[in-house]
């Protein structure tokens, strides 16, 4: 495994100015560092949209890009999450991990509508190998609009719980185990949308 010369530094999300955290109506950040899993294993699960429902029960109505199940920069795909209507998502970044560099994937989405319905989303991921047989998975999302502000104020914070379920599910699936929907954070909080 090839790691950067200075393994004390970790990669960061690259934010478009419009979606910079702290300037939007909702922001969440979830991270996990796990042992015994490689970035390439996680990437295979995250980048293949056809596998999402097998380890992340808070998504539905998935339509892969016309090019296939893998998410490549410039692709458009569709899915629903957190009870929102189906989102059309545009892949802004898709770089697999390797050569000591983090894998990066990010997409943007927007729901049209009036002031009470419209929302803009930017969801980004990092997947990188760390020293000592560890992998780091970071996901952060910003949202703009009244529905985003309402979601930010919800207790328990369903987006925070749901994204942790996504991370935990990735690690569980990469280790060859099954995710039990009823044992997820959202299910335990009575907040599972699907």
Image (tube, rainbow, N blue to C red):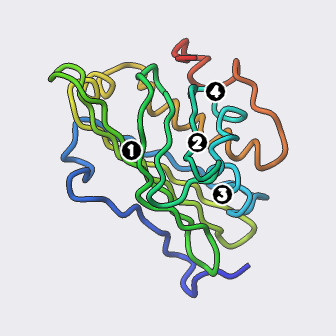
Q: Using the numbered discs, state the Cα–Cα distance from disc 4 to disc 2 in whole angstroms.
A: 17 Å
Q: In the figure, 73 relative to 168: above or below?
A: below
Residue at numbered disc 2: 64
Check if mark 2's residue and mark 1's residue have beta carbons within 8 Å. no
Dot placed on the residue nearer the N-terminal end, 1 or 3: 3
* Residue at mark 3: 43
Image quadrant occupied by the N terminus: bottom right
Camera-nearest label, 4 or 2: 2
Q: Position of residue 79 (x, y in %)?
A: 51, 32
Distance, label 2 to label 1, CA atoms, is 21 Å
**55 relative to 121 in the view: left or right:** right
Residue depth check, mark 2 versus mark 3: number of the one nearer the observer: 2
Mark 4 and mark 3 residues within 8 Å of each other at the beta carbon: no
For this orientation, the residue located farthest to the bottom is 5
Residue 178 location (% of width, % of height) = 81, 34
The residue labelled by disc 1 is 141
At x 60%, y 59%, the residue is: 136
| Numbered disc 3: secondary structure | helix
Determine the CA span between mark 1 and mark 3: 18 Å
Q: Is residue 133 left or right of residue 89?
A: right
Asked if labels 2 and 4 touch by Cβ distance under 8 angstroms, the answer is no
What residue would you read off at disc 4? 57
Kindly identify the residue that appears in the image at 56 percent across and 22 percent down.
186
């Amino acid at each position: 495994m090839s790691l950067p010369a200075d393994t004390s530094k970790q990669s960061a999300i690259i934010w478009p100015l419009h979606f910079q955290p702290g300037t939007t109506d909702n922001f969440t950040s979830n991270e996990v560092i796990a042992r015994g899993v490689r970035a390439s294993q996680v990437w295979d699960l995250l980048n293949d949209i056809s596998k999402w429902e097998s380890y992340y029960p808070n998504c539905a109505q998935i339509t892969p890009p016309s090019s296939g199940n893998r998410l490549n920069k410039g692709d458009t795909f569709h899915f629903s999450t957190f009870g929102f209507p189906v989102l059309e998502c545009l892949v802004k970044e898709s770089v697999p991990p390797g050569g000591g560099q983090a894998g990066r994937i990010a997409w943007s989405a927007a729901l049209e509508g009036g002031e009470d319905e419209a929302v803009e989303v930017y969801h980004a991921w990092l997947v990188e190998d760390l020293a000592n047989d560890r992998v780091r998975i970071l996901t952060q999302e910003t949202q703009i609009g009244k529905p985003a502000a309402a979601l930010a104020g919800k207790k328990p914070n369903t987006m925070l719980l749901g994204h942790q379920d996504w991370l935990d599910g990735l690690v569980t699936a990469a280790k060859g185990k099954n995710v039990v929907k009823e044992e997820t954070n959202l299910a335990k909080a009575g907040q599972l949308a699907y």
